[in-house]
Amino acid sequence: MAYKTILSMLVFGLLVCQWASAAGPAPVNLGTAGNFAILAKSGVSTTGTTSIVGDVGVSPIDSTAITGFGLIMDTTNEFSTSSLITGKAYAADYTAPTPTKMTTAISDMETAYTDAAGRTNPTATEFGAGNIDGMTIAPGLYKWGTGVMIPTGVTLSGGPDDVWIFQIAQNLNVGNGAIITLAGGAQAKNVFWQLFGEATLGTTADMKGIILSQTSIAINTGARLNGRALAQTAVTLDANAITAPSGSSGVATPSATA
């Protein structure tokens, strides 16, 4: 017992040191929503040849709202597969335990959105008057009472454990061909775009991070996303490449034992 207690203290101490060394706010814990590359409440649709690395899910809408993927039901009826998805597709009308799984994931997505939106003491407010094009942005919490535009690109510069949270009161518009660059070891799993309005990624844009949208996410022709598209309405795709980032987004509470 003493050995377990000492080992637990060492593990906790290492985690505390890691958190303390990271710049920016604490990451947003996505819960089970972090198991999905794309998660939406009212539908996911695609045209063209889209490629998704990660799972796709919808709830409370049923599987008829996952369109353009040519879904093939698994023999368990718990999930579907598609030639466009390196992963699985889940919907609220599939066989148990999938409905419960999806209800939990949607609830976790909403909780994560509320967490991100409720963070206080921002590093900066109204940064760039809503146009952050061409800037190099350090880790931190950034808040706007307006929308945010990125016409050609922005650089997020920081270490692998550093965190960015962008609180956007209106829409996020990423321009055609715009590139979000991660520098210094920054990771897509630690970048959170929380927006009350819609997210629109322009044609051939190269986006990084977790998009938590109160409404819809539209990813236009040829755009890429290294991150997750988590929408409280719908996600629309057009010949896109979506890759869920490796590693967990958010910090779990250490257990009492090793």
Image (cartoon, rainbow, N blue to C red):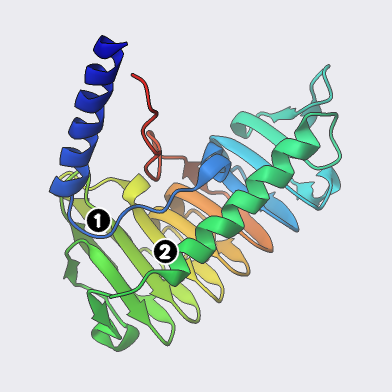
At label 2, the amino acid type is Trp
x then y, percent, for residue 235: 64, 58
Assess disc 1: are there few (<14), some (14-19) or many (≥20) residues with their C-alpha within 10 Å of its C-alpha: some
Q: Is residue 45 left or right of residue 139?
A: right
Residue found 44% across the figure and 50% down from its top: 225
Residue found 18% across the figure and 31% down from its top: 14
Q: CA distance from mark 1 to mark 2?
A: 15 Å
Q: Which mark is residue 113?
A: none
Helix, strand or loop at mark 1: strand
x then y, percent, for residue 36: 57, 40
x then y, percent, for residue 43: 74, 55
Assess disc 2: are there few (<14), some (14-19) or many (≥20) residues with their C-alpha within 10 Å of its C-alpha: many
Identify the image quadrant of residue 230. bottom right
Q: Is residue 104 left or right of residue 176?
A: right
Q: Badge 1 is on which residue?
A: 181
Closer to the eye: label 1 or 2: 2
Front residue of 103/229: it is: 103
At label 1, the amino acid type is Thr
Q: Which mark is residue 193?
A: 2
Front residue of 106/6: it is: 6
